[in-house]
Image: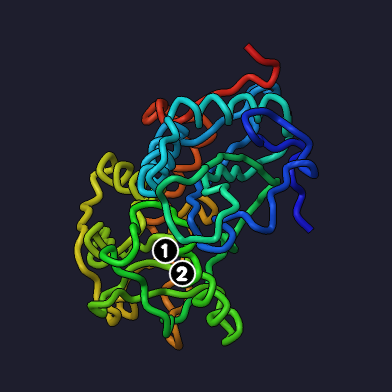
Amino acid sequence: MHDFLPYAWFKGKCVPFEEAKISIATHALHYGTGAFGGMRAIPDPSDSEKFLLFRLDRHAKRLSQSARLLLTELSEETIINSIEKWIQVNKPSKPIYIRPFVFTSDLGIAPRLHNIETDFFIYGLELGDYLSPEGVTCRISSWQRQEDSSLPLRGKISGAYITSSLAKTEAVKSGFDEALLLNSRGKVSEASGMNLFLVRDGNLITPGVDQDILEGITRASVIEIANYLNINVIERPVDKTELFIADEVFLTGTAAKITPVKKIETTVLKNDRPIMMKLKSLLINITENKSEVFRDWVSTIDLRGD
């Protein structure tokens, strides 16, 4: 049972969550013609009347770009202002996950993106750890990550997540926690909903944006943090066999945060993860507004209003 927040942002205003309903004939429901964002917000440890949002501007920019991939306009300002008002109305007291969604709201049956109505909503739920902070087990999925030539992978297009859903369920039903997908060239792409990093010989390695990955915001943040900590970062194609001999492997994402991988297929990985722990420690301090560096990554929303 999910603990949804009591209010949703729907048709330009806050309404009770139960009243935010769409028709069964909604175009996006049938054709996957929607795009979503996902962000975390936490109570300010130093002020219970304030909430902290991690990289709100970057999330708004990506969702706005995703909307353009659906041939519709949704400005970053609209997204940010709507989220701020929505949080102030809900007045959450625990860490939450926020789901903004832009979609074709028309009731037509033709698969298209022209001459069609679109809409935007926000809802949220209380969320702790999405994956176990102690680590997860992974298998290489039999499902392949799509190519950017067939789907706009730089946006979080809802229809694209059928592959993630198939891969995740395949992994869980075969005794693993998570799936790792290869791309059409046989290189490591990403997990079902997270980006992937590995450490070899002190270098932090991650598949580049040319490997059909989602341009993850947590991924980009980890790279910037690593650069700040003088950890050498290499973005390049990654072979499957590298995962089995890596010194460390971990996943990143808004929901997953930084989650270690403890086993891939039948290979058990090392428990010692010094580089991941350095990155994770600083990322936590940043998100809790306790760090002097990257302070501009955190937006503060006063629950009492302006």
Q: Are marks 1 and 2 in contact (CB under 8 Å)?
A: yes
Kind of residue at disc 2: Val
Q: Residue furthest top?
A: 306
Q: CA distance from mark 1 to mark 2?
A: 5 Å
What residue is rendered at 43% in x and 61% in y?
Answer: 251
Q: Residue 267 in the image: x percent, y percent?
A: 42, 84
Q: Which residue in the structure is indicated by mark 2?
A: 261
Q: Is residue 169 positioned above or below 233 on the image? A: below
Foreground pick, 97 / 156: 156
Q: Is residue 218 left or right of residue 166?
A: left
Q: How many marks?
A: 2
Mark 1 neighbour density, 10 Å: few (under 14) some (14–19) many (20 or more): many
- Colour treatment of the image: rainbow
Q: Nearer the viewer, residue 191 or 266?
A: 191
Indicate the amino acid at tag 1: Phe
Q: Earlier in the sequence, mark 1 or mark 2?
A: 1
Q: What residue does disc 1 label?
A: 250
Q: Secondary structure at mark 2?
A: strand
Measuring 74% from the left and 41% from the top, which residue is drawn there? 5
Position of residue 51 measured from the top left corner of the image (x, y, whole percent): 62, 28
Identify which residue is drawn at 25% across, 67% down. 200
Secondary structure at badge 1 equals strand
